[in-house]
Image (tube, grey):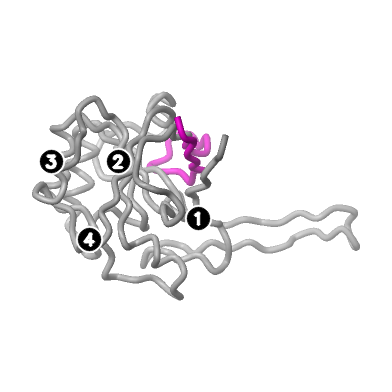
Amino acid sequence: MRIYDISVPLSNELHAYPGDPRVLVEPVLTLADDGADVCRITLAGHSGTHLDAPSHMLEGGATMDAVPLSLFMGRALVADLRGLRELGERELEGLFLRGEERLLLKTDNSLLWARPGFCRDYVSLTPDGARFLAGAGIRLVGIDYLSIERFGGDGSVHRDLLGAGVVILEGLDLSGVEEGVYELICLPLRIPAADGAPARAVLRRF
């Protein structure tokens, strides 16, 4: 059974959303001098491939440790939406979402990971697209860049999704995955009271 790793590597070269701390991996002990290699990893809760909890954007919202783990595992639809600049209701209404709870949006963003530096002109979900997905019964939505909302957005996309109980999975790399139905396994780090957490996300074909 083939496993598709759709996480981005946590390295010093990884893009960071402007204003967020960059990932830093640095040695603190070495095998030669200390008898073991040990590194220090500095990162934000929203570094790389990560999940947003309701508390990220909602006052009194649930923190990541309160979100059921069952949301992060199970059937997921990967929708190929390459060639589009934004994802609104009009762009999404052609997807067959009946019975689907997890949706991963494959866009041209997946090509941005190979470019140096953060790209502000990435494909994003619009407010009406967020409301459409929430109304369609989606409970987890993922996208292949560091934010599901346009750069400089007012947070309404996040609030509409999180307020409707939709968990957001950001920072995916879907470049090597074809459209279709998979099993998603995506577990956030167990950080008490966190508003978000890095995660390792993989897909398996059903």
Give the labeled residue for mark 2: 141
Q: How many marks can you see?
A: 4
Query: For the residues carrying marks 4 and 1, which lies nearer the camera in this image?
Result: 1
First in sequence, mark 2 or 1: give its number: 1
Which numbered dot is residue 205?
none
Q: Is residue 55 visible?
A: no
Nearest the eye: 2 or 126: 2
Nearest the eye: 42 or 169: 169
Q: Measuring 52% from the left and 34% from the top, which residue is drawn there?
A: 190
Give the labeled residue for mark 3: 131
First in sequence, mark 4 or 1: give its number: 1
User: Which amino acid type corresponds to the residue marked 2 in the rendered image?
Assistant: Val
- Identify the element where label 3 is drawn: helix
| Residue 76 shown left or right of residue 8 in the figure | left
Residue 150 percent coordinates (x, y):
22, 61
Please state the extent of the stretch shown in magenta in the rendering.
Answer: 186-206
First in sequence, mark 3 or 4: give its number: 3
| Residue 77 shown left or right of residue 125 in the figure | right
Q: Residues within 10 Å of mark 3 (few under 14, many from 20)?
A: some
| Dot 1 and dot 3 residues touching (CB under 8 Å) | no
Q: CA distance from mark 3 to mark 4?
A: 15 Å
Q: CA distance from mark 3 to mark 2?
A: 12 Å
- Residue 63 picture quarter: top left
| Residue 42 shown left or right of residue 129 in the figure | right
Residue 100 percent coordinates (x, y):
27, 29
Nearest the eye: 41 or 130: 130
Which numbered dot is residue 150?
4
Give the labeled residue for mark 1: 8
